[in-house]
Image: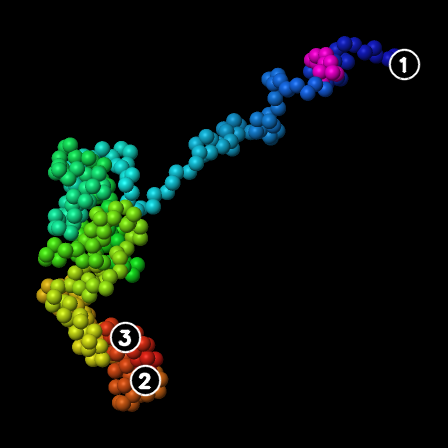
Amino acid sequence: MILAKPTALSSSALRPSAVPSTSVNPKQQLSAGPVQDTGTRSTLARGFSPLDSFEPAAVINRRQPSPASMAAPAPQASGVPSANDKRPAGDTRTAAQLVDDSPVLKKLGRQKDIKFEQLCKQTGVDPKLDLKDPKQNADGVYRLTKVLEFIDSAKASTGGDRENKVQGGKGDGNIEGITKDGDARHGTEAGMLKDFAEKGYSFLGEHQLPTTKDTHVKADGSNKDNFQWAAGEAGKALWFLPGVSNVLTGIGNSEGGFKGVLEGAATGYFNTLKGAAEGVIGSITKGRANPAGMIFGGVMGALGSTEAAPQPVKDIANLLG
């Protein structure tokens, strides 16, 4: 048998490629001194796994957190106006353009309880200059606009929607609640604006009108004229006469004017008929299908639908009907 003599080529092919090594002093290996970076740090130390070598660079980069994503999240806007509000980036509108773009600011009156100069002081507007003056503080006008629009779009004092005043989150452009004498009634938009003028931004918070005991103020924050007020008060006093009470209450809650009075009265009358009809039907379904039972059911149904009736009375009427 002839044995092959190993050659340099065959031996190198059989051995794994060796990494050139340098002589290391064992004492140096045990040294407690700082470890020097020789430029051959492992990829694991840099945040990569062994699998990264099989993935495209774009995939690897996508997995790495970017500096922007590691930054603190920007605070979310609460929607409540602030003394630090400014025109958003890119908004270069002048004071005059801001006024033209805001119906509620355009229509803002100068009645005594509007307290215009104090409003200017709270928002940074120069009261000595016209709102559209080229020298006017545009950011101040922007802040004033935000306050007015916030109040104009507020919910009712109960937290419900003011569907006849606010549509799509925007108010109707009128600050209501000023009397003929220029006074702002509490519980109205004008009253809320007066409070802001006197107390500043700390007054703003809940996006709804404040509650009030003023009987001249309707649920939606608007004023009742003297005729509406008298009708509403009479409706409260005559709650035991469902038809009369509902008609009078409907007039008291109407928008005012001849057309509004008719619509309010019709609504009250319809509610009475609806309640009476439901009471009659209820008496039949409960086995009282006789004239006396149906009359009693109709009366109870009408009373239960009387808006001005005390709540305990309505509850008992609905139970008996």
Color theme of the render: rainbow
Disc 1 secondary structure class = loop
Residue 24: give x, y in percent of width and height. 72, 14
Query: In the rendered structure, which disc, 1 or 3, sits on the residue that comes first in sequence?
Result: 1
From the viewer's perspective, is 26 left or right of 153?
Answer: right
Kindly report the distance in space between the C-alpha atoms of the residues bearing marks 2 and 3. 26 Å
Query: In the rendered structure, which disc, 1 or 2, sits on the residue that comes first in sequence?
Result: 1
Tell me the quarter of the picture where residue 117 sits: top left
Residue range in magenta is 20-29
Front one among 1 and 298: 298
Q: Residue at x 18, y 50 (%)?
A: 173
Numbered disc in front, either 2 or 3: 3
* Residue receiving disc 3: 310
Q: Residue at x 43, y 32 (%)?
A: 68
From the viewer's perspective, is 59 left or right of 1?
Answer: left
Question: Vertically, is 291 above or below 158?
Answer: below
Q: Could you tell me the amino acid type at mark 2?
A: Ile
Front one among 178 and 60: 178
Residue 178: give x, y in percent of width and height. 14, 55
Disc 2 secondary structure class = helix
